[in-house]
Image (spheres, rainbow, N blue to C red):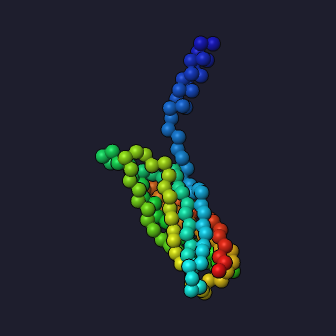
Amino acid sequence: MKRVILFFLTFLLITSCSKKDVKFEAFSSEAFAYDIGDGIAEVNASVRVKGFTQTEKNGSYEASINFSVDLVRPDNSVVKSIFKDVKKESKSEPIADVALEAQFNLDSTYVDGNYKLIFNITDNNSQSTTTSEVKFDLSR
């Protein structure tokens, strides 16, 4: 019986001290568009990512996330990479998550309707990828 209890306590100690790996994923995506005049709409979108690989150097934690945004029109045609950016984050403690933000304009050739944004995200340190989709309504 003592061996069973000792084994159980050892198992609990090992599993509770083991590092939990967080999957590279995107969450909390949102997007909206508003009319800025002259038939132009400004689109603002954001998404947060976690589970990326961080490098630690001289007490500084660094993350590098590359992303592009595809726009799906109401007729399901796709505008590839309507926005691109690289987000580099550096902190003195481990980074829990990073916010990715996109902002771009749509001219009057973009009709009112329901649009979708697809965030294509790559962790530059591990080359892991993920995507996130968010819908918004364009009405001027």
Left or right of 83 in this view: 58: left
Residue at (48, 71) in percent of width and height: 84
Determine the image quadrant of residue 76. Answer: bottom right
Q: Examine the rendered structure and indicate whether residue 117 appears above or below residue 57.
A: below
**Rendered location of residue 41, percent (x, y):** 58, 78
Closest to the observer: 21 or 140? Answer: 140
* Residue 25 in view of the camera: yes
Closest to the observer: 43 or 128? Answer: 43
Residue at (55, 60) in percent of width and height: 47
Q: How many marks?
A: 0
Closest to the observer: 67 or 95? Answer: 95
**Rendered location of residue 62, percent (x, y):** 39, 53
* Residue 128 in view of the camera: no
Residue at (54, 31) in percent of width and height: 16
**Rendered location of residue 4, percent (x, y):** 61, 17
Q: Examine the rendered structure and indicate whether residue 137 appears above or below residue 49.
A: below
Determine the image quadrant of residue 28. Answer: bottom right
Closest to the observer: 115 or 68? Answer: 115
Left or right of 130 in this view: 87: left
**Rendered location of residue 1, percent (x, y):** 63, 13
Going by the picture, which residue comes out furthest to the left?
58
